Amino acid sequence: MKNAMQFKAYIKKMAIEKNISAQLVLQNYMLERLLERISKSKYSSNIILKGGFLIGAIVGIDSRTTMDLDTTIKALKVSKENIKDIFEEIIQVDLDDEIKFNIKNVDDIREKDEYTGIRVSLEALYPPLAVPLKVDVTTGDKITPKEIEYKFKLIFDENKEITILAYNLETVLAEKLETIISRSILNTRPRDYYDVYILWKLQKENIDTGTLKQALQETAKKRETINHIENYSKTLEDIEENQNMIKQWNVYKNKFNYASEIEFIDTCSAVRDILEKIF
């Protein structure tokens, strides 16, 4: 590891190369350091990567960044106490990279008064830098057919890769599609649309439509939204014409360079294209 000034210069250089903010590069670097510790810990067969960080690994950090790590856990009890103990062990894994982690908080995640998991707030330390990070932990997620061993190429050391458990591509896409259709015009996360668009654009050849259909049906069944999925065409019409959705998208595309050339209708067309192919 370089000294702090060299490290900052390296982060800045990568930010310019990738056309994203230095803060996002720094956070993604620290998340990668944490992920490698997970892969080397005794919990590597229990923690499954999903969400934005996985999507960024699939499509490239210059096409998708995130500020937290989304995971699901299998074969372990999910409680605040247990998750805290697990992460206390994980952050003790020594990679000789001079990064230290502190756990700041472990809280329940609640959305609309529903318990959805545990959030671990951490701080990655490389003096004088202190970088806040979050890891969300859920349990009981439906992965169709099952999680995969994903060869994660380190963004900051391209000659090295680590093996982690992760969602398969079809389940990543299925969860996004289910959310888009079931939440309809109430969805306040434009990144769901971007993720479907970019995964379909860059990974279409690697997506098995039969598995995707099954994954979407299983996800909708678990979330009790099968009827929404069956009526996707009308829902998409409502979404495409909704001015608030378009406005939200425009805010998102102006914030992230990688989305700046994409119109909201393009993302909706990708959603429709996928659903028409599998139904």
Image (spheres, grey):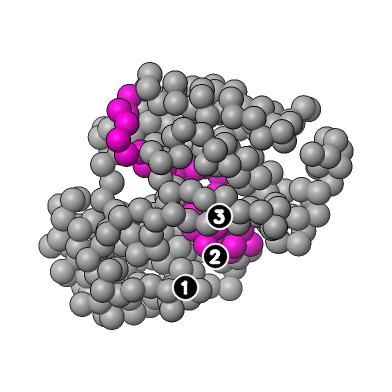
Q: Which mark is residue 203?
A: 1
Q: Is residue 266 left or right of residue 277?
A: right
Residue 260 locus on image (x, y percent): 59, 68
Q: Residues within 10 Å of mark 3 (few under 14, many from 20)?
A: many
Asked if residue 241 shows in the view, the reply is no
The residue beneath circle 3 is 152
Locate residue 278, reporting x and y percent.
Answer: 25, 77
Q: Mark 2 sits on what residue?
A: 59
Quadrant where the C terminus sits is bottom left
**Residue 214 figure quarter:** bottom left
Q: What residue lies at 37% left-to-right and 22% top-to-bottom? A: 82
SS state under label 1: helix
When the figure is inspected, residue 106 is found, relative to residue 35, above or below; the finding is above
Mark 3 or mark 1, whichever is nearer to me: 3
Choose between 62 and 84: the one closer to the eye: 84
- Residue type at tag 1: Gln
> Is disc 1 in contact with disc 2, using a CB cutoff of under 8 Å?
yes
Asked if residue 212 lies left or right of residue 38, the reply is left
